[in-house]
Image (cartoon, coloured by chain):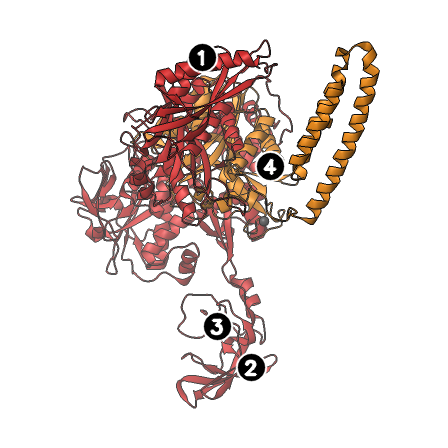
Amino acid sequence: MKVTYRWLKEFVDFKETPAELAGMLTEAGLEVEEVEPRIKPFTDVVVGYVNKAEKHPNADKLSVCEVKTDEGTYQVICGAPNVKQGQYVPFAKVGAQLPIGIKLKKAKIRGVESFGMICSKEELGLEAHSDGIWAFDKEYPLGADVYRLLEEEYQDWIFDIAITPNRGDCLSVYGIAREVAALTGNPLKPIQVKVEEASSERVEDLVKIEIHDTEGCPRYAGRIIRNVKIAPSPEWMQQKLEAVGLRPINNIVDITNYVLMELGHPLHAFDLATLSGPEIHVRASKPGERFVTLDDKERILPENTVMICDAEKAVAIGGIMGGQNSEVSDSTQNIFLESAYFKPERIATASKRLGLSTDASQRFERGTDPENVVRAIDRAAQLMVELADGEVVQGIYDVYPQPIKQNEIPLNTERINRILGTDFDKEAIRQKLLSIQLQVKGDRVIVPTFRHDLSIVEDLAEEVARLTGYSNLPAHDRATIPYDMPISEHERQMRFFREELLALGLQEIFTQSMVKKEEAFAFASEEPIKIKNPVSDDMAFMRPSLLAGMLKAVSHNLNRNNRNLRFFEIGRIFTHFDGKNIPTQPYSLAVVITGNRYLPAWNVSEQWVDFYDIKGYLETFLRKIFLDNYQIILYDKSKYMTPEETIAIQSGDELLGVGGRIHPDVCAVFDIEHPVFAFELNVDVLTKHVLFERQYQPIPKFPYSERDIALLLDEGITAADVVEFVKKNGGSLLQSVDIFDVYQGDKIPAGKRSLGLRLRYQSAERTLSDREVDKYFRQIINKTTKHFSASLRK
Amino acid sequence: MNEIIEKIRAEFLQDSKAIKSLKDLEPFRVKFLGRKGLISSAFDRMGELPKEERPLFGKALNELKKELEAQYQELLNRFKRAEEKGHRLDLTLPGRKPFAGGRHPLLKVADEIKDIFRGLGFSIEDGPEIENDFYNFEALNIPKTHPARDMQDTLYITDDILLRTHTSPVQIRVMKRQKPPIQMIAPGRVYRRDTPDASHSPFFHQVEGLVVDEGITFADLKGVIQAFAHRMFGKDVKVRFRPSFFPFTEPSAEYDFSCVFCGGKGCRVCKNTGWMEISGAGMVHPNVFKAAGVDPEKYTGYAFGMGIDRIAMIKYAIDDIRIFFENDVRFLNQF
Ligand SMILES: [Zn+2]
């Protein structure tokens, strides 16, 4: 909302400077976003007198002039057709800085020298386009600074104010003036309009108004103005409208806009000749109804839109926009002027569904003042008398079957203080409420209809706080907090997982949760969750896996030659949606790696990461979070992993997640050519299996003994099979079985594989003797070789 | 007795021949002269000898010890000299570096915010990102036709299910399951239908705060935000509250911090105002209490929000929000 400093002064006599006023308004909740001077500063432009103006010897359209100032006379070339001897003009001296961004220099034009310039209003930034120089209509003293002269007489400041949706009353100059009056402690001048009703006709005899939809339109008033002369509106009105961002059109339209800006009440002027009847019927739209608005667009009306109709047809969308069929044109003679009050919710819904937001709809949907209906129509009618030579017909046709009541709020001083932490007495509160024109009667506050946003005592508390200034309210520097605030288990677990991932040397990333179709489908085991009105196709689906966002980050980095990546992320994924209830949104945890196994260096040979690297990260992570009972199984059901390089982790019957190599087809979706390895775990399932509370296990007191053996086995026998068998049958002193070597090649028969096993024996009670260990070792080796038909590799 | 001495001497001689460089010397020393070395062990086993033999054996052992120590010293000097003349490590060559990760800067700032509020006695709560209309709007006193719905252009899954536009739904969820006193924050991702540019992202991150108890006032809200500002940006930061409008609070406020770049004098970042807009706050609206089943006659409360992205951008002087979500390692490595 734009208002100007001078316009506000028409209603309140205040002393504050523009900057002071802006500060006060902002502190009171009317945030001033910008204060812009109407006249941009310029220098070295002085009052000059045109001594002589003669035709340029070498150019028809130029004049050679002699301009006199208090300092002397200057020869100046001027291109304006209206320059004449005897004019007082704004004269820009050499060196003048003009608001249009020019610094004036000495010039030679068609062989004649020019020392300065006679300015137009355009060149001084006073209007958008000038046809000639500006000749003053007064004799100012020669050499007087023109900017100073203008500043005193014309300078104004345009305030751009952000109005919150509850303050529809401030979408007008008068509404803001009401705030200014309260804040500066000056009286607000009342608006009193006396309409000269020159015509002897009566409005009731000329038109009939009926409201069929009183819910959507509680009040509708009309006036008729005869014999208007359509013409441009006067300069002062055009200037004010332009200052607040409206384009002047003609006197009638400008008057309705002017009243809209001044009082905040939208009006609509119809060409009376186009209204059949003439009658006005206010009704709700029917399904499928079409209407051509005055911007020449045919619109399909949403059902239940308030429509203004004549005896035959619709002529306006109530409170939003008029119709092409009834708009004021150059040949209009008689005006039917509408001033109505529409129900905010109805206008809001229609405006949203139509995708049509206008100065009128913005005000009606925030709630206008039903009591302003008459004031606004009178103000506009009188302006039509003064500016368009109109003759106003007697009376207002005002249909208002059920007047809207003023809100009443109990003046509960105790509660206001309880909310604000203050100790205002009743009188202090009363004074504040009176200053914004509320009425206080005993223990009740009566709220005028322009402040319909005030309905409960909390609203009064805000008004009291606002008028006191939030900065002046007390602030506590301590609090009384119960010691046993519950702490969130979820937060604690997340921190734990995150810290362990960081300890593995991984980089945390934070990726987008909305992805494009192909990215979502690459990971989804069922239809991914789709956004109905996405920002773009790139963000149309919710990620079914963290990897969807993470691979995007991998791709971004690879494209920029950041090749060695070790990423992790924890976040929500969006999997199952039944169409009714909010979808399951479990937390997920994923690690993605690609590039070199070791950071490249002069003494490190280059090796690429492979399956065993991601498996190592997975195993270490699971050890560090103390997931004790889990199995790693071979897994070929993943949609996005390479089947021969994929494992799954399960605990009991529950799948915790999968790990392995991302399928090259999936990489291709992300434009990735390098091999990428990843694992992803369902955190919600994981937390069920992790023992967060742990107890210390004593460290073994006695030394261990180790024995190594290399077994020659058939290729098909997996390492896990062998290790499991050895563990199961190795006796109670066998602590662990590790694989220290794997060999397949020339040195052993084809179809065979050699596995090097390291067995560790240890007792909690004593040091084991070599003989004892050897005995157990021999026994298990015999069992194992027999079981797997293996032989010992020498 | 002499056999033992001779055996040690012979082994010493044998092993000393195998020493190739300085680094082989230390295990060699440990084996013979260490605290649990062969000589020490021999001393330990002196108890096994007949009493009369012990002094003689001790003397011989001591002599052996001196002899071997001298020889060891000579070996040490020899290899040191050789090492000095020959291949020395070039210590200026770069070392082998392990992968070192780190926290994402946005989450680092979120951690900092959480830690501050934990220190002030707040619990940390969490809620779903896909919400239904009730929690995101209705319960927060934003009915269907409310103009405030326009302020938050919403992404929808169905007519009733949507991507939460703020973290405020967590307020309702917590109040519904927990009786006052409540003192919580809820950090998380929120969504708006904004076209991405330097200052907008269709998803961003907020921290919601809610305190409900008997006797909570606007003065408590002012105090807590002030305390947060001081801990986050230092004691010199000033806080300004301005009246504003949110359907779920009354009175409502917007709060600003004095510009950390110019100290409030005015600069390009704060558009010469000296202030940086942070977010909104206010006293919980009685309609919100009613929707969440809290008695508005008995309890009062305050709520506030803040943008994690915004605070991170201020803290690290970042001027484009999108850089957080590109995850370029050259960016991430700076934190
Ligand atoms: Zn600044």
Q: Amino acid at mark 3?
A: Asp
Which residue corresponds to mark 4?
B232
Q: Is residue A167 visible?
A: yes
Which residue corresponds to mark 2?
A68
Q: CA distance from mark 1 to mark 4?
A: 66 Å
Is there a contact, CB below 8 Å, between mark 1 and mark 3?
no
Q: Mark 1 or 2, which is nearer the eye? A: 1
The quadrant in which the C terminus of chain B is found is top right
Which residue corresponds to mark 3?
A137
Mark 2 and mark 3 lie on one chain; the one further toward the N terminus is 2
Q: Quadrant of residue A700?
A: top right
Mark 1 and mark 2 lie on one chain; the one further toward the N terminus is 2
Q: Amino acid at mark 4?
A: Met
Is there a contact, CB below 8 Å, between mark 2 and mark 3?
no
Ligand 1 closer than 8 Å to the CB at disc 1?
no
Foreground of the two, B219 or A689:
A689
Element marked by disc 2? strand
Across and down, in percent, residue A8 comes to 50, 50
For label 2, the crowd category at 10 Å Cα-Cα, with few meaning under 14, some 14 to 19 and many 20 or more, is many
For label 4, the crowd category at 10 Å Cα-Cα, with few meaning under 14, some 14 to 19 and many 20 or more, is some
Element marked by disc 4? helix
Foreground of the two, A119 or A503:
A503
Q: CA distance from mark 2 to mark 4?
A: 64 Å
Q: Is residue A587 visible?
A: no
Is B158 rendered above or below residue B81?
above
| Apparent colour of chain B | orange
